[in-house]
Image (cartoon, helix red, strand yellow):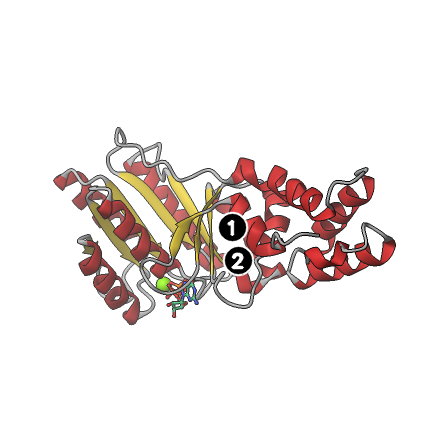
Amino acid sequence: MPNLFARGIDDDALEALETELLLADVGVEATRSLVDALQRTPTNGKRAVDVLRTTILELLDPLAVPLAVSSDTKPFVILAVGVNGTGKTTTVGKLAHRLAAERRSVVIAAADTYRAAAVEQLAEWGRRAGATVVSQADGADPAAVVHDALAAARARGADVVLADTAGRLHTDAGLMDELAKIRRVISRFDPGAPHETLLVLDASQGQNALVQAERFHARLGVTGLVITKLDGTAKGGIVIAIARKLRLPIRFVAIGEAIEDFEVFSASEFAHALIGDSPA
Ligand SMILES: Nc1nc2c(ncn2[C@@H]2O[C@H](COP(=O)(O)OP(=O)(O)OP(=O)(O)O)[C@@H](O)[C@H]2O)c(=O)[nH]1
Ligand SMILES: [Mg+2]
């Protein structure tokens, strides 16, 4: 991308930039605003790529807020939600591992009762993280599983409850109601909970991820985002569009399937991955 500005910020360069940003999934509106920002900025010697980076950082830095798991709140309840296959279960496993490494005791609620394999998948992650996994038979009420997990966590004084939920389309009213019910069960257990509602988004889904974020947030009050699959071809530009629209904290990024492929979101690393930093 930086090479676009080898000859300075002229119309050709701006047009080429627009194309690059659109290809990176930044989306029409957010691309427009970045290109406008560049057009407005008197660059007098400043490198255009630096102006672009600064504009992106001004947007994303305030949203790079790590998840703070309070030790005063026991259990601290984290609910993971999102559409099918975005990486919720993997994220719950990786997060359990990270929290366990911080010497926190973790209970995982296997509240995806639709897919038999989901419980096995979590049991494996739970073993690796040393976390207890609470589950029920297939087809059980997911809210009941979460309730069991909360009760178990309270009984043993666990620090954190991580609830994995089944994937669902934001357009599926029945399944969105089910999530709202899970949320109510959690709030009845502790009026301050869930302390974090994590929406897991797949970066490769482009503009659709923005629509998912809007819908899940409107329904559940999302408090943090996890952006997965940034190791793929997706440049993750959709993060910029979502940031502009919703201003939700971005907690983590996932860059692969393995336990260590999970990092706290950094605005500068993200900007670097998106636009590079070679001289303009
Ligand atoms: N390349 C890559 N693959 C990932 C990443 N995160 C998860 N996956 C893979 O994506 C697939 C789906 O991950 P899951 O964690 O099962 O996704 P899910 O959201 O729980 O799926 P459902 O429960 O079916 O909705 C698995 O094969 C994961 O290993 C990532 O950051 N990068
Ligand atoms: Mg899952």
Is 120 placed left or right of 18 in the picture?
left
Above or below for 13 versus 184: below
**Mark 2: few/some/many CA within 10 Å (<14, 14-19, 20+):** some
Which residue is at the front of the view, 8 or 129?
A: 8
Give the number of the disc on residue 216. Answer: 1
Ligand 2 position by quadrant: bottom left
**Residue drawn 26% across the image and 65% down it:** 119
Q: Amino acid at mark 1?
A: Phe
Is there any visible trace of residue 24 in the rendered image?
A: yes
Picture quadrant of residue 218: top right
**Residue drawn 42% across the image and 39% down it:** 66
Give the number of the disc on residue 170. Answer: 2
Asked if the residue at tag 2 contacts the one at tag 1, i.e. Cβ–Cβ closer than 8 Å, the answer is yes
Q: CA distance from mark 1 to mark 2?
A: 6 Å
Q: Amino acid at mark 2?
A: His
Secondary structure category for the residue under label 1: helix
Which residue is at the front of the view, 72 or 98?
A: 98
Above or below for 204 versus 2: below
Mark 1 CB in 8 Å range of ligand 1? Answer: no
Which circle's residue, 1 or 2, is located before the other in the chain? 2
